[in-house]
Amino acid sequence: MIKNILIFMGLFLMLMLAQSIANPLFVWNELFYQFEMFDLRGLIKGSIYLVSYLTAILAMFIFLKLKSKKLFISFLFLLFILVSIDFFVQLLGVHHGFSYAEYTLAMNETGNYKYLMAYSSSIVKALLYAFVFVLSLYFIRQKILKNHLHSRWALFVFLPLALTYGACYRMDTFKLSSYPAMIKIPDIAVSYLQFSEPIKERILAKEVKSNSNAKFKNIVWIIDESITGSYLSINGYEKKTTPYLDVLSKKSNDFTNFGIANSISNCSASSNLFLRIGVNPYHYEKEQISDLPTIFQYAKRAGYKTWLFDSQTREGHLQNHLSIYDKESIDNFKTLGSEVERPKRDKRFLDEMISLVNNVKTEDKNFIVMVKYGAHFPYLLTYEANKVPFAPTLEHSYDAMSFKNRDKQLNTYANSVYFNVDLYFKHMMRKIDLSKSIVFYTSDHGQNILEVKGVTRTHCNTGEIVKNEVSVPLFVFTQHAKTLFPKDKKGYYSHIQIFPTTLSLMGYDSTLVASYGKTLKKSYAQSSDRKYILSSSQEAKVYK
């Protein structure tokens, strides 16, 4: 019994090392990431991750003890292939190994397999590492394990496959790449076959040119997560969630607040995609969304160096329908590992952005998109514990979306808004040089915090959309912002206007700009606001 436990622990250590050569503690980091402090959901998620991971080790242990040597050798051969693939991806610099993004790339680049020869040394190393790994397993079976199991135990392998697939499908913080190669690669293949559609490359027509000098050296988009425009005190909310911005709006000419704006969707993935490709009611009706070029393509054509800082997704992962083809127009794509705590993720990239724009070279221009972690539910995990002006708050997220806890939930969310909006921009404005930069700020969507009886989902509702789900802030920061972008107090704005405004600033002609709708120089009529909401359900009812 003790020997079996020691072998099991040894297999655990081997998998930890194999899963990330560069960071053998990857699994522990992932485990701590799932066991979220102050959140009872974290206990459930962490336990599911731990159990599902341990079943993967148990499956390997069972295979080592199989009586049938032919079945065992077949398993070793398959494992050798899967681990080789994972090692190869790690040696290319992706420390977490094979993931959905790499599988997508492989499926779309099958005709270019010969290009792999450029990585011949990495391939040889990967094969060597994989051989040592399976040879170690062979040694354990031959020299240490004596008692063997009937071949029917081989069916156990389907349990960890099903368990991990189900866990990753149901929980958005779970990633298949967090599991051992022999589990994640088959599951990723199944996921791809089940959900993926062929990816089309977006084409920006060759004749489209930027025909005038850009007006700014740096153009920055900051896309927050789950920030509701109506919960900002600068927009009239009774709690002082944005005291710094309240004062800044009155005293500074470098800040324009467009008030409570409409978001184009009430879901993160679709909203970020639509912002990236400039979807508006005109394009949505006339063209296929899959054909529209991205703002990164326009920026590259206009001579900008392009950057995407995503503090929300996991290290190396693509999200929000960002494809491998889209990445070709992004010069610098940066993400963070799970070891960076949630409240610190946005500030980490904010400081990088500030340094970048303040030190831009004379010959350079930068277009930067920052996708924030923001106020992602559960809210109590999105701010530092000592930054809590509003009380009482929730102690954990269990039963948070219950009407009896609404007041605590509102205070918890208000703290998140204060930390992720007000303190965030207070830090930015103290350090950034706006003389040659312009910063646009909005959120992907807002939040429903128990505002309509019977509707407890925070966003992405379809049949019954609460108005605050599509209520977002919209700011512009630059020198003389109020003069350059005066707000029409009688008008109405939507964050879809950021795209055409950016095209205009990059020097594209007015006809192209107008095809994407109005810039922030003009507002929409209040009566037409419904037309500029593209929710997750076109026919959905929007509660006022």
Image (tube, grey):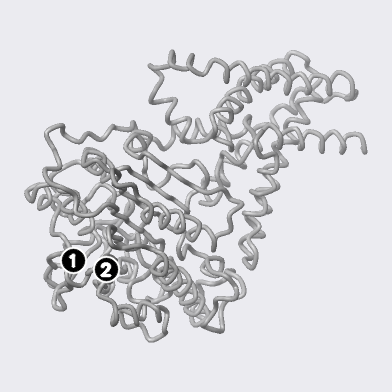
Q: Residue at x 81, y 19 (%)?
A: 67
Amino acid type for the residue under numbered disc 2: Val
Whether pointer 1 and pointer 2 mark residues with C-beta atoms closer than 8 Å, the reply is: yes
Amino acid type for the residue under numbered disc 1: Arg
Q: Residue at x 74, y 13 (%)?
A: 70
Give x and y (percent) for residue 228: 36, 70
Q: Secondary structure at mark 1?
A: helix
Placement of the C terminus among the 4 image quadrants: bottom left
User: Which mark, residue 10?
Assistant: none
Left or right: 196, with 262 as reference point: right
- The mark nearer the N terminus, 1 or 2, is 1
Give x and y (percent) for residue 203: 22, 34
Give x and y (percent) for residue 453: 40, 76
**Pick the front one: 425 or 39:** 425
Check disc 1: other Cα within 10 Å, few if <14, some if 14-19, many if 20+.
few
Give x and y (percent) for residue 102: 48, 31
Residue sticking out furthest to the front: 362
Q: Which residue is mark 1?
A: 530
Q: Secondary structure at mark 2?
A: strand
Q: Residue at x 86, y 18 (%)?
A: 142
Residue sticking out furthest to the left: 511
267 vs 392: above or below: above
Q: Nearer the viewer, mark 1 or mark 2?
A: 1
User: For residue 479, which quarter of the picture?
Assistant: bottom left
Q: Which residue is mark 2?
A: 542
Query: How many circles with numbers are drawn on the protein?
Result: 2
